[in-house]
Each structure stands twice: as structure tokens, then as C-alpha cells.
Amino acid sequence: MHGEHRFTEGPIALPLVKFTLPLLLAVFLQAMYGAVDLAVVGRFGTEQDLAAVATGSQIMETIAFFVMSLSMGTTVLIGRKLGQKREEEIGDVVGGSICLFAAAAAVITAVMLAAAEPIVTLMRVPPEAVEQTVSYVRICSAGSVCVVAYHVLGSVFRGLGDSRTPLAAAAVACVCNIGIDLLLEMLWEKPVAAAATATVLSQAVSVAVCVLLIRRRGAPFPFRRRQVRFQAQVTRKVLALGAPIALQDVLTDLAFLMVLAIVNGIGVTAVAAVGLAQKVCVFMMLVPSAYMESLSAFVAQNAGAGRDDRARRAMRYGMLMFLCLEAVLAAWMAGWGDWMAGLFGTQSAPVLLAAGRYLEACAVDMLLLSVLYCFIGYFDGWGRTRFVLLEGVAGAFLIRVPAAFLVSRLAPASYFLLGMGAPLASAVRLTLCVVYFWWLHRRGRSMTPEREP
């Protein structure tokens, strides 16, 4: 397998950037799934269809983020094995992870198919969009195994320092998603169901591409079929590292779903506007998000080698680069947010106006998150995932959800104030990260893996 990197010696900045760029492109293409659905449905469907996809895609993205975050345990564990030069143990990590996530895929599929309607009801989706939203969630849930498989394979590649293979798979899948989406929308009179079906089929393509590339190139570590079995030790370590990250991401996304449920009570225009605005925010944060993932892999390898000096330098490089970049993007978002929201398919003036006001507040959040994500990548790589869980929950449930509820009580509701909950939550989280980092390094606490494999 080509493209793997060892990060424990040599230059830091250039290898890390080379590793991050393919990962960024892969994350960008993954984010295109929901964006393409919104854009196509916005052209072919009604405002109710758009609201259904905005809500349904957010629900499914929560599932995808949960799987991706849980698989960070595999990434960190593989990275440490490389840093410790124990490559012969990587096969057991991969085999155990395959069984663990296969079981997770079965559970996710069963639960989401059974609970789609109650979940949509809890989301307070406007009555005219309920049926379409349930349809979107159920169709996407039927293909959950593809989502799980893609993210597990990606976690293995990231741990090995290989970001090119996931990019190749995501590129093929994205092209397929656009083509299938447009074809089904023209042939099918149900825009929401067509969009969901296209997403599932394209995810299946991405998994097939990954498997084909692995078979063609081979694995850079010893691996046998007998290693694909449930292994209590591997399962415990993966869950110990990944579960707090996954729980933090799920609770943060749950907080946004609660915000979206509050917004749903305002009306169809409100949910469509906030859904579009959130898509813009996702794209604006792709670069620091990708760096956060690559930094976790970088730090994990250096944690195995006991090189915290290199890990801290990599974190500082990211903060400097992305604070400057996000300052430019934030200014663009604040000035042309309505235009950016319009790129995702709708030309409804009320929806775009509301989305633009919401994005003016979110522009402040971009600056804070560019620094916060570097801290999180650093802590994840060291296995300090329980702290990441605590700071994420504090920001989401102590700040963002209460702020959204209070603003929704206003008549009329202010979209700018509704969006301000995000930067307020990020400010709290960033403060906690700074204090925790200072406590670790200025109080004589040695930086050692929280859970040594």
C-alpha cells in the first residue's frame, strides 16, 4: 500500500501538510453527499422536500460522525503501534476492529429503521414534511453498513499515515452520487427518496473502491484472515480511545438536532434556512476539520515514540495557519452568507435572507473553531479523549441549546441571535482546552497516553 507516512522523525510541517491535503479533499467530497442532495432537491422539489432533506441529512450525518469518531480509536491505536515499531500487532487491531464495527453496523441499521418515525417526530418536523423526512432516514439507514465500512477503512489508512486511498474512494463515490442523483431525480417523481437512494449507492461504491485498492496494493503489515475475529483486548482499547470521542461528537450533534427541533417550531422557512446555513458552515470548516484528523494520527505516532515536542509544534503550526485562513473565510461568510446559502439549491428569498443572518453570527464561530480543533486533535492523539468529551458536552448543553431556546421565544425570532449560540459554546470549549493544556504542561504533569495500549 502506497502513501503511508511515519511522523516520528524528520521535518514536521511539509509532511503533515502533504498528509492533510488528500484527507481534506476526501472530507470535502464526503460533505458533498448532503450538499448534492440539497442542491438537487432544491432544483427539482418543493420547499417541503428541501426541509425534509435538510433535517434527514442532519440525522444521518450524526450517525456518520458517530462511526467516524468511534473509529478514531482504531486510528490512534494503529498510530501508536507504528510509533512503537510494533507493526506485527497492527493486524490484530484491524481484524478486531472489523468485527467490532460489523456488529455496530447491524445495531445501527436495526435501530434506525425501527426508530425513524419517532426520531423525526422528536425533531418537530413540520407536518407537511414528516413523510418525506421519514422516507429519507429509512432509505439511508438501510445502507448504514456502507457508511460504517467506509469510515473503518478510512481509520486504518489514517493510522498508517495514508490519506490518498480514502481520497480515491471518495472521489469515485462523489462522481457517482452526482450522476445517480440527477438520473433518479429525472426518472423518479419522489425527489427525497431519489436523493437518499443515490447517497446509499455512492457509499457502496466508495467501499468497493477501497477494497479493490487494498487487494491490488497489499497491506504494509502482516495480516491473515484468522485475525478477523472478536478480540476482547482490541475491542476494549478501541472503545476506550474512541468511545469518548464518539460520544462527544454525538452529543454535540444531538445538541444541534435539538436546536434544529427548536427551529422547526418556528416554521418551514426557518428549518430550511438553518439547514442550508449549517451546510455552509460544514464546508467552511473542512480545512481545520481535516487537520484535526491528520493531527490526531500525527500525535498518536509521536505519542508511541514519546515525542511530545513534535506533537506540540504540529499543533501550533495548525493554529497559526488556520486562524489566518478562517479570518478570510469568516469575513466572506459575514458579507455574502445569503449568496453562499443560495449555492445549495434554493432561490427562495425568505430562506436565503434568514440563512444570511444566521451565518453572520456563525462567522465568529469559524475563528474560534480553527484554534479549538487543533487542541482537540492534539488531545485525541494522546488519548485524552475523556476531557474532549467533557468540554464538548459543556459547550453544547450548557450554552448552545439554552441559547437557542431563549431566542426562539422572541417574536419574531432573530436568526442572528439564534446563530450566536455556536460561538458562545465554542468560546467556553476553547477556554476549557487552554486551561487543561496549561494544567498538563505547567504543573509538571508529564504528557503520557491516558490509556496505554
Image: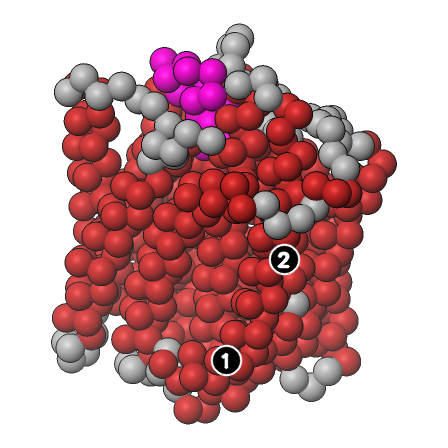
Provide residue 108's location: percent of width, then percent of height.
54, 67
- Three-letter amino acid code at the position of disc 2: Ala
As drawn, the residue found furthest toward the right would be 216
Residue contact between numbered discs 2 and 1, judged by CB atoms under 8 Å: no
Whether residue 381 is visible: yes
What residue is at 49 percent from the left and 34 percent from the top? 76
Task: Look at the numbered disc 2 and give the secondary structure of its residue.
Answer: helix
Please, what is the three-letter code of the amino acid marked with disc 1?
Ala
- Name the residue rendered at 33%, 35% in the picture: 384
Q: Residue at x 77, y 43 (%)?
A: 225
| Residue for badge 1 | 116
Quadrant into which the N terminus falls? top right
Q: Is residue 415 above or below residue 4?
A: below
Q: CA distance from mark 2 to mark 1?
A: 21 Å
Q: Position of residue 65 (x, y in %)?
A: 48, 55
**Pointer 1: residues within 10 angstroms few (<14), some, or many (20+)?**
many
Badge nearest the viewer, 2 or 1: 2
Residue under circle 2?
A: 102
Determine whether, in the image, residue 12 is placed left or right of residue 426: right
Query: In the rendered view, does 424 fall on the left or right side of 224?
Result: left
Q: Main secondary structure of the magenta part?
A: helix
> Where does the image place residue 309, in percent across and percent down from the top left?
36, 13
Magenta includes 299?
Answer: yes
Per the rendered image, the range of residues in magenta is 294-311
Q: Nearer the viewer, residue 294 or 267?
A: 294
**Left-right relation of 212 to 42:** right
